Amino acid sequence: HSLSANFFAEPIDLMFVFEINAFMHPIARVMPAKRVLLYPTYDLSDDQISNFEDLGVSVLPDDAILKPPNPAFRKILEEAVAMRQARLQRPKDRLLLLPADIRPIKGQLDFLSGLVFEGARRPSAVQRLRGLTLVVAGGCDGNQTYCAEVVAMTQKINAEKLLNVVVADQLKDDELAQLFTASLGVVLHPVIDCNPRVVYEGLLTDTPFFVTESARLPAAVQHLGHVTDGDPGMVAERLADFVDLSEAGGFTGRPRDFAQKHLSEVDNYRKVLEWMDNKYISGKVSEPTIRGEEALDGLGGLGGNLASILSGAGGGLAGLGGLAGLGGLGGGVASPPPQRAAGGGNMGFNMREPVRR
């Protein structure tokens, strides 16, 4: 039965709201629950969290927990690490991985624009990245215009013949695992994010990260990579410093050691359950809700503010390379396959639901 036409006769003991943008739906804001728990929230200030608590909603901040890889993908990652160690002498290729669906909130266009040599604020920094390959591994998440702009920017960078950018679309788990093990770093440049799990998948393969502050990583992991303020004009220089340190072995061994010690599913999710238990006992009881159309119509405050930053629909970016375009990770990375001009009639987009991590 639809909750728009029915209601619970008695209050729910505990309601867990997954993602703050669920409150954009009026029904979620009038569900009768004695306790309401919320995670993730993206970027909430302490005052905003306090306001939620006053309304009977207990918030678990994004950067309050670690996120172990799920067991199935963890096994694939471990197998990829063992395979590479048995086959190759060098620990990493001159390669960076950008594992995220292509959409404005993920910031791929801003990141790539900082790697264009022509008109760069610091051209020498772009020169330092010569020969580096970047793999954009993610499907188009609905915004076809933005995806076309990302493709056009990769073509502009490739035309300068300093860096090699490959748009690889959505990859199979084993292909993605190979990229994790081969990469000098996992790169994320979001406008806003919620402690993405791909960072922890990288740590398991001894791969450090290059992210913006907006990724909202816990302080406990920030020594295992590079966290920047996201200034596009400084991307090339900061990325070059990160690549130099990674190639010199500055992170070697530390990410994987941390992952093996601290990314236990049992330990981390026990902490979440303990937090939930504590909030259930000590949190403020939610006020009774008003039933009726006026309640649903009058609670639109959260939705409008969140919609502008938490939008997105399913989509996929196909026909633009794939893992095969890298020429095999074991023997170095080949040039990307030809890409059709952005805005062309046959650029290769399709509409598939993206894989979210």
Image: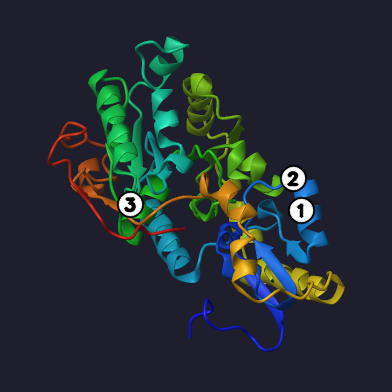
Are the residues at dot 2 and dot 3 in contact (C-beta closer than 8 Å)?
no
Quadrant position of residue 222: top right
- Above-or-below relation of 44 to 153: below
- Labels in figure, total: 3
Q: Position of residue 287 (x, y in %)?
A: 79, 72
The residue most toward the bottom is 9
For mark 3, give the secondary structure.
Answer: helix
Residue at which label 3 appears:
87
Which numbered circle lies on residue 49? Answer: 1
> Which label's residue is closer to the chain start, 3 or 1?
1
Quadrant position of residue 224: top right
Residue type marked 2: Ser
Q: Viewer-nearest of labels 3 and 1?
A: 1
- Above-or-below relation of 225 to 350: above
Are the residues at dot 2 and dot 1 in contact (C-beta closer than 8 Å)?
yes
Which numbered circle lies on residue 45? Answer: 2
In front of the other: 35 or 107? 35
Residue positioned 52% across, 20% down in the render: 234
In front of the other: 173 or 183? 173
> Which label's residue is closer to the chain start, 2 or 3?
2
Q: CA distance from mark 2 to mark 1?
A: 6 Å
Residue positioned 62% across, 75% down in the render: 292
Residue 132 seen in render? yes
Residue type marked 1: Ile
